[in-house]
Image (cartoon, coloured by chain):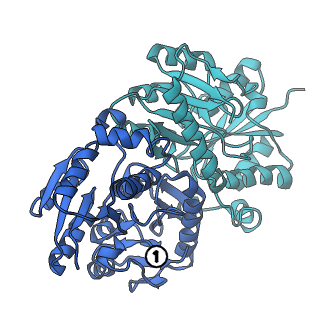
Chain colours: A blue, B cyan
Amino acid sequence: MVTKLGIIAGGGDLPLRICEECEESGRPFFVVAIEHQADIDRLSRFPHAVIRIGAAGKALKLFKKEGVRDLVMAGKVSRPSLAQLRPDAEALKFFATVGKGAGGDDDLLTRVANYFQDKHGFNVIPIGEVLGPTGVAAGSLTTTKPDAAQQADIDRGLFVLKTLGPADVGQAVVVQEGIVLGVEAIEGTDALIERCGNLKRPGPGPVLIKIAKPGQDSRVDLPTIGEQTVERVSAAGFSGIAIETDRTIIVDQARTVAAADRAGIFLTAIDP
Amino acid sequence: MVTKLGIIAGGGDLPLRICEECEESGRPFFVVAIEHQADIDRLSRFPHAVIRIGAAGKALKLFKKEGVRDLVMAGKVSRPSLAQLRPDAEALKFFATVGKGAGGDDDLLTRVANYFQDKHGFNVIPIGEVLGPTGVAAGSLTTTKPDAAQQADIDRGLFVLKTLGPADVGQAVVVQEGIVLGVEAIEGTDALIERCGNLKRPGPGPVLIKIAKPGQDSRVDLPTIGEQTVERVSAAGFSGIAIETDRTIIVDQARTVAAADRAGIFLTAIDP
């Protein structure tokens, strides 16, 4: 039996993609879009409600009223300041118990997922269970492939990301000729790309390396790229993108690879 | 006997400060200012020459001709792209031998220092030997002190910097209410401050945490702050700055602390 899917929607294209997937497969769904994070304009044609990020109690009530059992958390959620949070009674309960002492972003989201699951009986599922497997084989998906120098940049980027991993800060870095141009934190990948486009040096363009953090919970915020990422990277003068063989969501892979091929940049998957 | 000091000048106020110190103490000196990095306008009133970053042979010849024995490397040096480098014969020799396979920025600078010292008999000395001890006691230098939440931000920043340390990427992070707003890479501290000023949330302002990398060579690129740093941080709405008790150069400490006190922000030293 196909159950109704609850979608907690943060930023980016991914929540939209999940709604479309549900529509295509005929699976019933209900979206709770987080204010100031989700792309509400584009989500509003689906069954949805908009809530403040601190309104956990309202979200629970909505999902229960809609008869939702399975939940998926999709899209980037930036941690708000305490002033922006204005937690309702349920959110306060969360912070008083499991949310206390959360370190990085993912750690907090994992605790949110656990809270929905353990305290309220929802079944929080990985995005891959809705969109199909997220993995790709190692190697280039594009006609263009990284040369030896670009491969060295990918290796350097990987090393930086793995080193930084335990601090739970960012998923992406940009490297050019062995020089780390930028490390992602709260600004997100789009802002990182734009900034590094302005910092790049003459010569072969930089490489964007984006991987999941070590031990990252696959129910929350997996690295996501799509056609838009390719376009931004290309406009910034990069030479390519490296992602993981697993745990990277490519929103509409065919379109994304086609865009990279048109732009003459590589998109390559590595086994970190 | 006071020997003539050779100064390899990168960006920022530090090379200027060293020239002034030499002038005040009557120590003879000669500046080799790196094009596109050093503030040549302000250095040009001192005995100096301007060289391309790849002109290592020319720098050596100048220092030898000037009778320099002690060398100090001061100021930020951004690694150029290979295209910008245009190495002369001496620089090519460096890259063919010790420079090969240098990882991060500091690793390369350390190799440059060793090259001047071991291959050419110069005595490369830490900046502290010219400007006096760089250490300060643990605790706040300002009237304003970090509160418990700001202290937690400092601790989080320290953890991120120590975790990232082995990757030899950046010296600074910005944290607000436990959220890492930004991680420094090639853009430098000034650009990091500006960016995080635009990313900050309502509530108490972010904290800049800046420390040397673990095992960083004290002859090259120690973290440096000054009045200008304080002014930038204050303009961006930060609440304070945390530095190390050792291995941080405060350019004109009295002026810097006075500026922080005027702005009502804290400047605190921690023992990492």
Residue at horizontal 21 percent and vertical 51 percent from the top: A61
> In the image as oriented, which residue stretches furthest toward the left?
A45
B234 in relation to B120, above or below: above
Residue A149 screen position, x and y as percent: 56, 74
Q: What's the residue at 67%, 50% (across, down)?
A: B106
Residue B38, can we see it?
A: no
Q: Is residue B263 above or below residue B99?
A: above
> Quadrant location of the C terminus of chain A?
bottom right
Q: Name the residue under label 1.
A: A246
Residue at x 41% of width, y 29% of height: B205
Q: Residue B183 appears at what percent x and percent y?
A: 50, 47
Q: Name the residue type under label 1.
A: Asp
Secondary structure of residue under mark 1? loop
* Left or right of A37 on screen, residue A270: right
Where does the image place residue A148, in percent across and percent down from the top left? 56, 78
Left or right, residue B103 beside residue A56: right
Comparing B97 with A166, the one in front is A166
Q: How crowded is mark 1: few (under 14 residues within 10 Å), some or many (20 or more)?
A: some
The x and y percentages for residue A80 are 34, 41
